[in-house]
């Protein structure tokens, strides 16, 4: 997520700056046209300036999608009107304004990659169709008011150079983003062989604040740098197809920890929650590998929880249900992570052999102040009760959140309020000594 946010942030700043530059330059031209009393052209310029400055204002308010759609719609309309009324080809100078339709289509494509939608695809198609039309015809509407040829001769050169430069700029920006991801993917591949991954453990507690288990969370320790959050590198690893291999490593490390815990009375009843990515879960041999590993290491399957996310439901639900069923039959707990943020419908939820749902922290965090959030949380607990599932509340940061969730009947919690993720030795020291959790004041 962080990586996507950074990418969006860079794009937002670049787009805001471009809108500002276009606005200022066009305002300058508008003054020239007004001075020459070329009023129709000055009016067109006003339309461009209003669009550019409004887009700039929207990017400043972090409304990038709105800014992009506004620009795309307005500029498409402006270019079409300009081509029909003012930029009419003659024997001396060709039409050039339609070249900017290619720039618009590229902008649409970049926006589509950021946030795909049918509307965006339709806009791209409209830009390309309009480009083909204006490139292939000399159509001249009867009420056209063409710019004089002596200006258009220079304008053709200038506008073509500007349009081609904008295309090159867009392609360069895309190439840089691509190279950045490739670099990170290459480093990730090396990270596995260089043993740069570590597992951190975040405590999970019951309603009295007593330790019941932990969630294993992946960290990447870059040489010479600090820890990189999984939210930053997992999307890249997923894209590069590395998640099954990295997930294998996580699972094996988690098994080692479970074996270690089983040897001590203070820790042998703890459960360990392990996150599983879609690619990893959908591998043909996932279930067999997990069961064989537990058997080989003589691990009690009831100590293991596998956390899956709702986004998985986009895949073959029948197969997912079958795989979950086999794991559940072996005694493993299936947990649905980040509940409420994905797309799983109630009918999916009814079909899934899930024991536990983890309410996403976004529901928890605003809850004490928001009555609507409280009602939503309450209905999640009602649904879970109806479907015979238990609920873990994630992302508890304050006493108020803890109390509120307790009042809904929640009995399992995780969050910074109880403890941050720690490397295993620190987790053991802080939490597993004599099985006495340092939580007396929070209970
Ligand atoms: P998740 O499974 O929902 O894990 C919980 C995330 O919330 C963790 O972030 C944790 O540090 C953070 N968190 C816990 N309590 C609080 C709190 O009170 N406040 C706030 N603001 N955050 C809290 P982390 O470790 O950065 O992990 C992010 C996500 O990366 C995880 O979300 C999970 O989806 C994914 N992930 C982590 N490790 C693995 C892994 O080994 N395999 C796979 N497939 N995904 C993993
Ligand atoms: Mg999780
Ligand atoms: Mg979660």
Image (cartoon, rainbow, N blue to C red):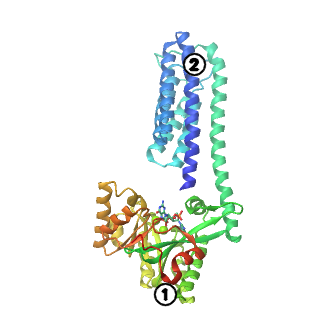
Q: Which residue occupies the foreground of this view, 356 or 87?
A: 356
Q: Tell me whether circle 2 and circle 1 mark residues in contact (CB < 8 Å).
A: no
Q: Is mark 2 within 8 Å of ligand 1?
A: no
Mark 1 burial class by Cα count in 10 Å: few <14, some 14-19, many 20+: some
Discs 2/1, front: 1
Quarter of the picture containing the C terminus is bottom left
Residue 163 relative to residue 277: left or right: right
Secondary structure beneath disc 1?
loop
Q: Which residue occupies 49% across, 27% down? A: 78
Q: Quadrant of residue 296?
A: bottom right
* Label of residue 300 in the image: 1
- Looking at the rendered structure, which numbered label has been put on residue 115? none
Position of residue 390 in the picture relative to residue 30 (left or right): left
From what the image shows, is residue 56 above or below residue 437?
Answer: above
The percent position of residue 25, horizontal first and vertical second, equals 59, 24
- Give the label on residue 29, or none: 2
Between 209 and 62, the one nearer to me in the picture: 209
Image location of residue 162, percent across then percent down: 64, 29
Q: Nearer the viewer, residue 91 or 399?
A: 399
Residue 75 horizontal/vertical position (percent) = 50, 31
Q: Residue at x 67, y 56 (%)?
A: 182
Q: Is residue 304 above or below residue 307?
A: below
**Residue visible at 59% across and 31% down?**
99
Q: Residue at x 67, y 24 (%)?
A: 157
Q: Quadrant of residue 388?
A: bottom left
Q: Give the spatial CA distance, label 2 vs label 1.
A: 76 Å
């Amino acid at each position: 997520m962080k990586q996507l946010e950074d990418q969006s942030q860079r794009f937002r700043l670049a787009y805001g700056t471009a809108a500002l530059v276009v606005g200022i330059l066009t305002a300058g031209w508008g003054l020239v046209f007004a001075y020459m009393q070329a009023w129709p052209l000055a009016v067109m310029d006003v339309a461009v300036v209003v669009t550019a400055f409004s887009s700039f204002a929207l990017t400043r308010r972090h409304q990038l999608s709105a800014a992009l759609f506004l620009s795309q719609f307005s500029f498409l309309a402006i270019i079409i009107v300009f081509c029909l009324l003012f930029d009419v080809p003659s024997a001396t100078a060709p039409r050039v304004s339609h070249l900017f339709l290619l720039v618009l289509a590229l902008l649409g494509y970049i926006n589509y990659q950021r946030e795909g939608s049918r509307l965006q695809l339709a806009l791209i198609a409209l830009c390309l169709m309009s480009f083909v039309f204006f490139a292939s015809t000399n159509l001249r509407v009867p009420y056209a008011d063409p710019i004089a040829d002596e200006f258009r001769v220079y304008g053709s050169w200038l506008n073509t150079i500007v349009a081609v430069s904008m295309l090159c700029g867009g392609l360069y920006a895309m190439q840089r983003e691509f190279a950045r991801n490739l670099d990170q993917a290459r480093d990730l591949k090396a990270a596995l062989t260089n043993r740069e991954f570590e597992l951190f453990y975040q405590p999970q507690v019951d309603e009295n604040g007593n330790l019941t288990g932990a969630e294993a969370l992946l960290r990447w320790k870059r040489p010479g740098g600090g820890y990189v959050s999984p939210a930053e590198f997992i999307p890249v690893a997923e894209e590069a197809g590395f998640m099954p291999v990295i997930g294998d490593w996580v699972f094996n490390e988690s098994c080692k920890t479970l074996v270690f815990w089983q040897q001590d009375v203070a820790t042998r009843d703890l459960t360990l929650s392990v996150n599983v990515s879609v690619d990893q879960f959908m591998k043909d041999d996932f279930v067999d590998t997990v069961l064989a590993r537990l058997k080989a290491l003589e691990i009690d399957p009831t100590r293991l929880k596998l956390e899956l996310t709702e986004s998985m439901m986009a895949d073959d639900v029948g197969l997912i249900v079958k795989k979950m069923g086999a794991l559940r039959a072996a005694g493993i707990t299936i947990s649905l992570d980040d509940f409420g943020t994905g797309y799983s419908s109630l009918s999916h939820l009814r079909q899934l052999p899930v024991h536990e749902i983890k309410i996403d922290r976004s529901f928890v965090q605003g809850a004490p102040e928001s009555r609507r959030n409280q009602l939503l949380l309450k209905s999640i607990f009602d649904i879970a009760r109806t479907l015979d599932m238990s609920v873990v509340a994630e992302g508890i940061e304050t006493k108020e959140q803890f109390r509120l969730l307790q009042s809904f009947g929640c009995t399992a919690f995780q969050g910074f309020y109880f403890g941050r993720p720690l490397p295993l030795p620190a987790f053991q020291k802080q939490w597993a000594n004599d099985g006495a959790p340092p939580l007396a004041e929070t209970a």
